[in-house]
Amino acid sequence: MTLLETGVDRKTALSPWVFRVDNLVKVYGSGSGAANDGITLEVRPGEVYGLLGPNGAGKSTLVKQVMGLLKPTRGSIVLGSVDLVQNPAAARQLSSYLPQAQVPIDSFRVKEAIEIAGLIRGGRSSDVRHRTRALLEALQIDEWRNSYGARLSGGVRRLVGFAMATVCPGRIVFLDEPTNDVDPLRRRLLWDRIRSIADDGSAVFLVTHNVLEAENSVDRLAVIDGGRIVAEGTPSSVKAEYRGRMRLTVMMIPGTPDPIFPDFVRGSTRVANRLVVHINEPDVARIIEWAQGLMARGLAEEYALAATSLEDAYIRLTGTSIGNRRDG
C-alpha cells in the first residue's frame, strides 16, 4: 500500500513527523473506568521515548489506539499532520510495530521472514536484502538465517521479530517489551540497534516495565499508572527529588526478617531477599557500618552502595513494589 492509497497526500508526506497524543481517553464500556484517562505526550523524530508502567496501567490500550486497532473514546492521535484516528490505514502504513507476543513465523525461515516483512512495507528488494543481512549480523543471529521459526529459542525469535519490524522502519517505531527473553549480550546489541533507528530519523516509542534498562536507553519517558501519566521527562528529571540521596542494596540471607533500621534511613523496600535502603549522602559512612554489622551477624550476604535510580522514583509513583516498604 502506498502513501497515496492510505489517503496521505504528498504535502502531508513531506511534513515534520512529530507524533502527538492529546487528551486521549478510552473507556471500554458503560460503568467501567477509563483504561486511558487524558493522556497527552509527544515523541519527536530522532528520539527514543519510553512508556513505563505496571501490568494493567494502560500501556497496551494506548498502543492499540495508535495502531488503529482501537478507536479512542475521545482525544486525538497525530503523526505529522496525519490524523491517525480518522485514518487508521495510514497509522499502519506510517508506523512499525513489534507486539509483546511472539511473531507467528513457525513455517518461515529467519531470512525470508525478515525480507517478506520488508517487502510488505514497501521496501525495494535490494535494500531489504542488504538491511536484512545487516540486522542478522548486528544482532548476532546470522547462524539461524536458514532456520525455521518453530526451531528457534524464545530470545532468538524475539530478535527476529524486532528485525521484521525494523527492516523498513516507519516514521515512528513502536516496540512493546522488545527485550523479553533476550540474553544479556544480545540485549545490549538490541539497544544499540534501537538507538540507531532513532539516529536515522525515526521516532521510537518504547513500551517496557524494565526500569533499569529504560533509564540507560531512553531520551525521555512517561510513567503511566491507572490509565494516567503520573510523571514525564528525562530519566534525570523524573528522579530529581532523590538528588542528594543514596541507595544501599543488601542481599539478605533467605528466611531472615527485616532488620531494625537506623533512624536516619529515609525509606526502604524489600523484594524477596533484596533489601533497598535510602539515605541522605552525609549518612553514607554510617549506613555502610550498619550493613557490615548485618553481615557480621550472619543476616546478609553482600551489599552495594550507589546513587538512587529511576527504579526508586518508579516505585514511589506506581506503588508496585512487592514486600515491605516504609517511606520517610
Image (cartoon, helix red, strand yellow):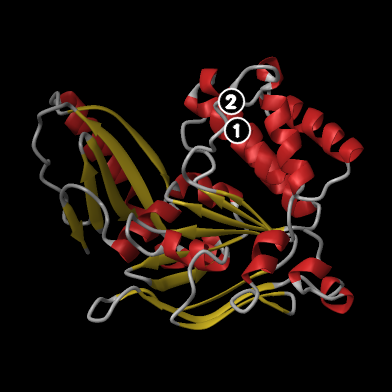
Amino acid at the residue labelled 2: Ser
- Whether residue 243 appears in this view of the structure is no
Point out the image quarter for the C terminus. bottom left
Residue at which label 2 appears = 107
Q: Nearer the viewer, mark 2 or mark 1?
A: 2
Dot 1, crowdedness within 10 Å: few (<14), some or many (≥20)?
many
Closest to the observer: 139 or 24? 24
The residue wearing badge 1 is 159
Residue at 75% in and 50% down = 121
**Residue nearest the observer in this picture, 309 or 214:** 214
Identify which residue is drawn at 44% across, 46% down.
210
Front-most of residues 198 and 309: 198
Q: Amino acid at mark 1?
A: Leu
Horizontal relation, residue 102 to residue 325: left or right: right
Res 139 → quadrant? top right
Q: In the image, residue 293 lies at what x, y percent? A: 19, 32
List x then y, in percent, for residue 207: 50, 54
Residue 191: quarter of image: top right
Q: How far apart, in angstroms, are the residues tagged by discs 2 and 1?
A: 17 Å
Q: Quadrant of the N terminus?
A: bottom right
Image point 53% across, 35% down: which residue? 104
Q: Quadrant of residue 79?
A: bottom right
Which element carries disc 2, helix, strand or loop? Answer: loop
Helix, strand or loop at disc 1? helix
Identify the residue at horizontal 71%, vertical 34% (top origin): 114
Q: Is residue 73 above or below residue 302?
A: below
